[in-house]
Image: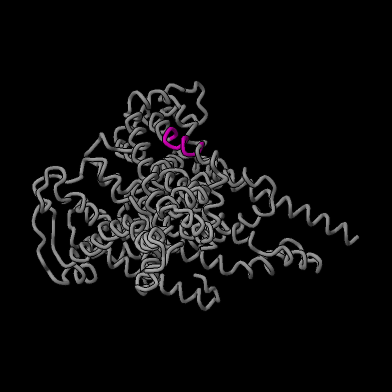
Amino acid sequence: MATEPLRDRAIVPKQQRRRLQQKDWAPYVFLSPMIFFFVVFFALPIGFALYLTFTRWNPLSTPKFVGLKNYTYLLTQDPSFYLTLKNTFVFAFGTALIGIPLALIIAFVFTLSRGKPLWRSIYWLPMVTNVVAIAYIWQFILDGTYGLVNQLLSAVGIVGPQWLTDPQSAMIAVIMVAIWTGLGQNMLLFSAGLEGIDETFYEAARIDGANTLEIFWNVTLPLLRPTILFVSITSFIAGMGSFTLILVLTEGGPIQSTNVTALYMYQMAFQDLRMGRASAMAFILFVIIFIITLIQLRIFRRGGIEEY
Amino acid sequence: MGVQKRDTLSIILSIIKYTVLVAGAVIMILPFVDMFIGALRTPAERLARPPIYWPRTPEWSNYGRAFTELPMLRWYINSIFVTCVITFIQLLTSSMAGFAIAKYEFKGKKFLFNSVLAAQMFPFFLFLIPLFFLMRFWPLAGGNNLLGLGGTGFLGTYTALIIPFMITWYGVFLMRQFMMSIPTALMEAARIDGASEFRIYTHIVLPLVKPALATLGIFVFIYHWNEFIWTMTITRTANELQTLPVGIYLLRGAYQDAQGESLYQAALAISVVPLIILFLALQRFYVRGLATSGIKG
């Protein structure tokens, strides 16, 4: 439009010509806030953070250039970095591995049941609850002596662990809470996928005499494979970068047993004030997540799901 | 015989089905119930050994005391103010950008849309440090000079809680998806009638995407009402700016005795209830939004 030949312009009435020009620059006006925020609150911070990874800086001084020292320190010397990385993977894997089959089962029975709005409201409660409330609700429940969980366990003669205060069980407890928090979200994604399955598949299976369980194994699961992949991998990636729940629940303790890399990064930045090293850690974690994302895209492509 | 067997089996499966659903529902609700009950316990009931689970004399006053002993009202006002401003701005910026990408042809369109998609892949933890110092060293704000030195920048102001969240990449994407379906002929007709592009946006496009705006609005509202890590980082030392989750979190140390725990659980309950009510009232929009965002993407 912008390169329209002049002679064409001459025959277009004046008012309409003005309109055409307005149509040319209007999108940029509509986009200007987004572009401004993209530059100032996205590109600039990323660039600044990348610069910081090559410096030593506590905010009271001026940044001192140290080359790759932050990276080499983290990868070869830091006493906790690999431990937190391992915890990150355990947390993300554990949450996905247990949480997703659970969500799938619940979503399956949910789509077959009556009273959907009621069930949905119940399962989605954690989705609208703030992380502080979630964490403290569970701290009370998981209290080793007086918590509801251990009281129920002792009623059937089991001595429950100290959950959040025992390094042996803290990670399990944290994963349990994370699964509880994410169940509604995953269930929702699955039920959307389940509703997308054509009813004729089920009818055909029923005519062939299949029961609910057989339908689940032989019809639902294969047809739902794209959704299962999508939910598994997005929830794994989200798990890799999440740390606020752990921050409020355990602050990474006891003795680092639940400390994940993102939380370690946060503590290093805002408690130890080592901005350069913390930025380097953020970038290492980001690169790991990014690689996993790329692998995810490959799996999706191979699975024949082009639209992702 | 065969039919009868079939019937028994389907009854059994139906029982299993509802057992699973009910068991799950109990696990989902029980923690909230535990919180509401806990808020009613008296100190004596907490100190009894073994402690008394069901409060014999429910201490309803704990809910009132949460408002008088904690700056609950202040946190509420902050939460409402910050969340509403962010929601309004995000709806505006993402509907404008989504409109431009969906309904105009211009140079760099594909690049821009891909950037929006790519931006969603950057996790928030990457931005915590640089955004913090962007707020701190913002030029000519809070006593800063042109180079951003000398003052405190936006730290200690509402601006720091709002300005990094003025756009949502996900929102731009969602609006674009919805606006793709608006017929271009409608816009052309308006143009011939002499409507300006801005008028087309306000009078034709926005009314047509109202449901999408409602969906996105609820998402954004819930997300930012519950936003914790950024607000906590920024307002750790600025009490008067704290929102509900942050304020409650930072006061945790003072309420760990038998007296305080009930009060604390009451405060948690009060922070959760408004969103539950809002969510139940607007569930319809929420369902649709999540369904379209998650899979159809």
Q: Is residue A307 above or below residue B147?
A: below
Residue A239 visible in the snapshot? no
Q: Nearer the viewer, residue B141 or A90?
A: B141
Give the residue drawn at x 41%, y 23%: B64
Read off the magenta span. B269-277
Q: Position of residue B285 (x, y in %)?
A: 54, 47
Q: Nearer the viewer, residue B219 or A262?
A: B219
Give the residue drawn at x 44%, y 34%: B269
Q: Residue furthest bottom?
A: A302
Q: Nearer the viewer, residue A119 or B192?
A: B192
Q: Position of residue B144 (x, y in %)?
A: 11, 47
Q: Main secondary structure of the magenta part?
A: helix
Q: Position of residue A100 (x, y in %)?
A: 53, 60
Q: Residue furthest right?
A: B1
Q: Position of residue A242 (x, y in %)?
A: 37, 56
The number of discs equals 0
Q: Is residue A229 above or below residue A265?
A: below
Residue A71 visible in the snapshot? yes
Q: Is residue B272 magenta?
A: yes
Relative to residue B271, is residue B137 drawn left or right?
Answer: left
Give the residue drawn at x 34%, y 73%: A6
Relative to residue A226, is residue A277 drawn left or right?
Answer: left
Q: Which quarter of the image is occupied by the N terminus of chain B?
A: bottom right
Q: Quadrant of residue B72?
A: top left
